[in-house]
Image (cartoon, rainbow, N blue to C red):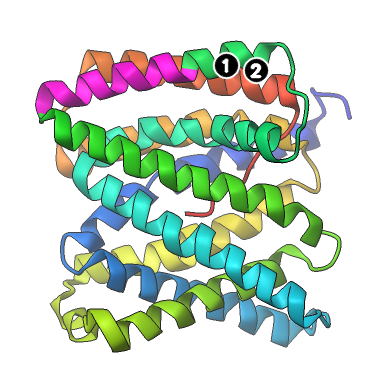
């Protein structure tokens, strides 16, 4: 399709709006985890979004029979990608703040490509080495900028948690590829998210015992949960998968930069977070590595958390 085609321009506009709206997610999540524990938030979030996907499948009768082993495999991937990874991203967000998280999030596609190279033995393009180097250099500058306004332990711990979380998501993305031919996106998400929710409710009943703290949520916190569960975890995913039917994944991945900028702006608007020059420079390097990496690899990764 001609890049100047009006229809394609419309898809690009939708992709841009999608990423800007998605950029509210870190701020909305911070509102919630300031009022209730991270573990309870994870439980509620994936319960709501998972049930919505399941209800959609039942109403549209799009649920396809799936083998028991495949069901177990998708459930395990869900626990890793939506459960374990959520612990990393949310505690990293809680420690480091919204702006720091937003800059760090640009590492996601690079880590995914690295996982594909290491696990699937894919051959990276020549420019991948440059992308990886720029992302590591950018990470160093973001860490240095965060260290200026906090402590080395906070900067390092938040970075480590977020990198490990995106490492989990990358592994999930790599191993979930084979299920794309067996189940559609909504069914995969329903199984993965509900499995995570069931596991988290089990932990709530046996270890955490945090359910009574739901009463601590203010209207602002409730609005944050509703936004993340309905808009970020359901609507944004639905729009993204719809866009993938019309626009190449690597072109959509380039719009991740808007997500980062949007998240940083909202972090400043809602929480007056200081944005230091070193963080901006490091974030710019990581955005550049994202552009080089996605152009080289020709693929993108939808974010899951």
Q: Can residue 107 be seen in this view?
A: yes
Q: Quadrant of residue 283?
A: top left
Which residue is located at x 24 percent, y 79 percent?
208
Which residue is located at x 34 percent, y 13 percent?
281
How far from the left and from the top, in percent, is residue 211? 24, 84
Based on the picture, tell me whether residue 136 belongs to the magenta stretch. Answer: yes
* Local secondary structure at mark 1: helix
Q: Quadrant of residue 30?
A: bottom left
* Local secondary structure at mark 2: helix
Total numbered circles = 2
Residue 262 vs residue 302, the one in the foreground: 302
Q: Is residue 187 left or right of residue 208?
A: right
Q: Are marks 2 and 1 in contact (CB under 8 Å)?
A: yes
Q: Is the magenta stretch mostly helix, strand or loop?
A: helix
Disc assigned to residue 131:
1
Q: Quadrant of residue 296?
A: top right
Q: Is residue 12 visible?
A: no
How far from the left and from the top, in percent, is residue 81? 53, 58
Based on the picture, tell me whether residue 12 belongs to the magenta stretch. Answer: no
- Figure check: 259 above or below 78: above
**Disc 1 residue crowd, few under 14, some 14–19, many 20+, Cα 10 Å:** many
Residue stretch in magenta: 135-149
Which residue is located at x 62 percent, y 37 percent?
115
Residue farthest toward the right in the current orientation of the protein? 1
**Disc 2 residue crowd, few under 14, some 14–19, many 20+, Cα 10 Å:** many
Residue 42 vs residue 214, the one in the foreground: 42
Q: In this view, does 281 lie to the left or right of 18?
A: left
How far from the left and from the top, in percent, is residue 35? 16, 66
According to the picture, the residue beneath numbered tag 2 turns out to be 128
Residue 268 vs residue 107, the one in the foreground: 107
């Amino acid at each position: 399709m001609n890049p100047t085609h009006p229809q394609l321009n419309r898809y690009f506009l939708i992709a841009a709006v999608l990423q800007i709206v998605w950029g509210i997610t870190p701020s909305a999540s911070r509102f919630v985890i300031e009022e209730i524990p991270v573990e309870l938030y994870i439980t509620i979030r994936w319960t709501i979004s998972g049930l919505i996907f399941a209800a959609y499948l039942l109403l549209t009768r799009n649920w396809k029979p799936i083998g028991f082993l495949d069901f177990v495999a998708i459930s395990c991937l869900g626990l890793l990608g939506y459960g374990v990874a959520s612990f990393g991203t949310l505690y990293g967000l809680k420690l480091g703040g919204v702006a720091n998280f937003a800059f760090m999030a640009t590492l996601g596609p690079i880590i995914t490509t690295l996982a594909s190279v290491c696990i699937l033995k894919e051959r990276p393009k020549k420019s991948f080495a440059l992308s990886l180097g720029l992302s590591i250099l950018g990470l160093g500058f973001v860490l240095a900028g965060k260290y200026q306004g906090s402590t080395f332990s906070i900067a390092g711990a938040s970075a480590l948690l977020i990198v490990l979380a995106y490492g989990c998501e990358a592994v999930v993305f790599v191993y979930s590829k084979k299920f794309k031919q067996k189940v559609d996106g909504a069914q995969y998400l329903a199984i993965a998210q509900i499995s995570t929710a069931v596991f988290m409710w089990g932990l709530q009943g046996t270890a955490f015992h945090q359910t009574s703290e739901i009463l601590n949520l203010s209207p602002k916190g409730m609005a944050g949960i509703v936004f993340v569960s309905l808009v970020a975890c359901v609507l944004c995913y639905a729009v993204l998968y719809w866009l993938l039917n019309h626009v190449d994944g690597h072109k959509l991945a380039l719009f991740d930069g808007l997500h980062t900028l949007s998240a940083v702006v909202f972090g400043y608007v809602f929480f007056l977070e200081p944005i230091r020059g070193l963080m901006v420079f490091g974030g710019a390097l990581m955005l550049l590595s994202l552009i080089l990496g996605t152009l080289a690899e020709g693929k993108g990764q939808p974010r899951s958390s």
